[in-house]
Every structure is written in C-alpha cells, then in structure tokens.
Image (cartoon, rainbow, N blue to C red):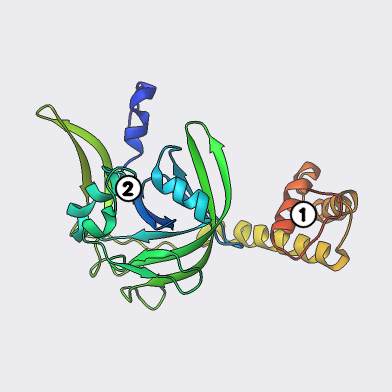
C-alpha cells in the first residue's frame, strides 16, 4: 500500500471512526451531557479513564464543580438523539438530556447521573485535570460499573445483540454540515493466540522479568531509589537486559502498589 503526504489540517479526520462516550455530570441543579470522541483507558489499577474536553464545554464546568461524573455508551438505535449531546449546550438549552428523551438513573457509589439508555455506564471520581493544547484531559477513577447483559461468558460484547455507535466526524453535503455516524450489520471475528507461536518464549520471558523485579523489590520495600535501581540492575543483568532499563522496571514496580520508594516522587 502506497502512502502519500497529506495536509496536517485534515489529519484529525482520518483518525475516525471512533466510539464516542457520553459524559454526564450535575451540579447546582443543572444536569449536562456531551459526546466525547477523544477518550481512553489510562491505567488498570487504579482504573483510570481520560477524556479530552474543550474548556468552554458546560459539562466540563459541571465536572470541575461536582468532582464526580458518569461515562455512558449508547447503541446505534439512539443515533437520532445525538444532536442533544453534541450540537447544543446545557448552558443555552436547559434540561437538554430529558428534553432529548434520555432517562436518568443515579449510581449507587457516587450518586452520579447515568443514562438508562446506555448498554454500559460508569461512575467516576475526578482525579486530575491536565491541560493539553486546546483541550483539558479529564482523568477520573472508575468507582462503579453497570452493564446490560449483552456479553458472552468471557465478558466480550455480543455484537449480534448490540450495535455500538461509531462517529466518523463532520462532512459537508449540499452546502450543509453534518455529523456522520456509523454501525454495521455484519461482524468479522478473528481470534489470535495471545503470546503464542514463535513469540511464546520471548512473551514468557518478558512476564517473568517483570514479575521477578516486582517480587525482589517488594521484599525489601521500602527502599531508596538507589537501592531499588541497584537491585533491579543486578537482576536484569542475568537476563541480558540493558542496565539503563532499570529505571523503567522500578517505575513499573511502583505502579504495582507492592513497592514503596522513599525518595522517589
């Protein structure tokens, strides 16, 4: 496949389709919600999710004030309601979620407003606001999850029962601007063995080294950064791993929650 250079101004459009998430929040009697396409899971433990939101968004104000909020996923059957989530602000169109026909329920952990129409909803505590360019990355810790029983026994979604809503960005037709959404009726599955075949040995080696570093440091915890680095380097040397990789394994050990470094912020 031959690639060609394109203008940076259109690069963002080529990142679609994305699966938008609906952010819901309430403060001072005002309930808001918005579609957000730029979001991602940031951590396993704690379970952090980050959502990029524009500063001016009214929903961002509600999150910033309330410190709790909800994240929701809806199916393609609700596509005609999305203008209430993406085109109009609660600041100027009061009670827009209910006026759009969305039903609200309260989460059990934080009393966060969530959508009954969602097939997946989560309650989050606000952990951090990080300014990145012209957006703010809202980082929250998931405290509770609610899901429709539309998944297999291995907790993968039954795509014969649910059609997720995907967003393709904005398009122009006949002098008008539209938001384009998409789903599909046919799903192609391909299951690949995790860490199998020719990758098996190196896959297991990577896991073993990580586990041994964490175990080694946890036995001596708490320790200084110098002590942690020396112990990690000694172990990594046995596996032929570069000494300057030690700092990355020490940070990984810290993130496990089993290791404490006295002089490392």
Foreground residue, 199 or 93? Answer: 93
Name the residue furthest bottom: 153
Identify the image quadrant of residue 126.
bottom right
* Residue 90 circle label: 2
CA distance separating discs 2 and 1 = 57 Å
Please tell me which residue is depicted at 66% across the width and 57% down the height of the picture.
206
Q: Is residue 136 visible?
A: yes
Q: Is residue 109 left or right of residue 235?
A: left
Q: Which callout, 2 or 1, points to the residue nearer the camera?
A: 2
Whether residue 227 is situated above or below residue 58 in the rendered picture: below
Residue tagged 1: 239
Q: Is residue 21 visible?
A: no
Q: For the residue labelled by badge 2, is the local secondary structure a helix, a strand or a loop?
A: loop
Foreground residue, 155 or 96? Answer: 96
Whether residue 151 is situated above or below residue 176 in the rendered picture: below
Q: Is residue 232 left or right of residue 161?
A: right
Where's residue 234, x and y in %? 86, 53
Quarter the N terminus occupies = top left
- For disc 1, the neighbor class at 10 Å (few under 14, some 14 to 19, many from 20) is few
Name the residue furthest front: 28
């Amino acid at each position: 496949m031959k690639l060609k250079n394109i203008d940076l101004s259109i690069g963002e459009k080529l990142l679609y389709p994305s699966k938008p998430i609906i952010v819901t929040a309430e403060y001072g009697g005002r309930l808001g919600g918005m579609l957000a396409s730029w979001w991602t899971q940031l951590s396993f433990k704690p379970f952090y999710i980050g959502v990029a939101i524009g500063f001016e968004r009214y929903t961002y104000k509600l999150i910033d004030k309330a410190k709790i909020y909800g994240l929701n996923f809806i199916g393609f059957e609700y596509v005609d309601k999305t203008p209430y989530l993406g085109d109009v602000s609660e600041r100027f169109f009061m009670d827009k979620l209910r006026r759009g026909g969305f039903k609200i329920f309260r989460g059990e952990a934080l009393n966060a407003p969530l959508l009954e129409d969602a097939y997946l909803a989560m309650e989050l505590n606000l952990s951090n606001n990080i300014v990145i360019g012209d957006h703010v990355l809202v980082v929250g810790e998931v405290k509770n999850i609610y899901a429709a029983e539309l998944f297999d026994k291995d907790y993968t979604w039954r795509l014969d029962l649910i059609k997720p809503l995907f967003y393709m960005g904005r398009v122009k037709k006949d002098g008008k601007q539209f938001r384009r959404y998409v789903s599909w009726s046919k799903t192609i599955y391909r299951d690949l063995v995790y860490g199998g075949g020719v990758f098996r040995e190196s896959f297991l080696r990577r896991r073993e080294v990580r586990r041994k570093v964490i175990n080694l440091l946890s036995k001596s915890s708490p320790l200084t950064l110098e002590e942690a680095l020396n112990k990690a380097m000694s172990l990594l040397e046995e596996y032929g791993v570069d000494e300057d990789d030690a700092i990355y394994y020490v940070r990984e050990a810290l993130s496990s929650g089993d290791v404490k470094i006295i002089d490392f912020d």
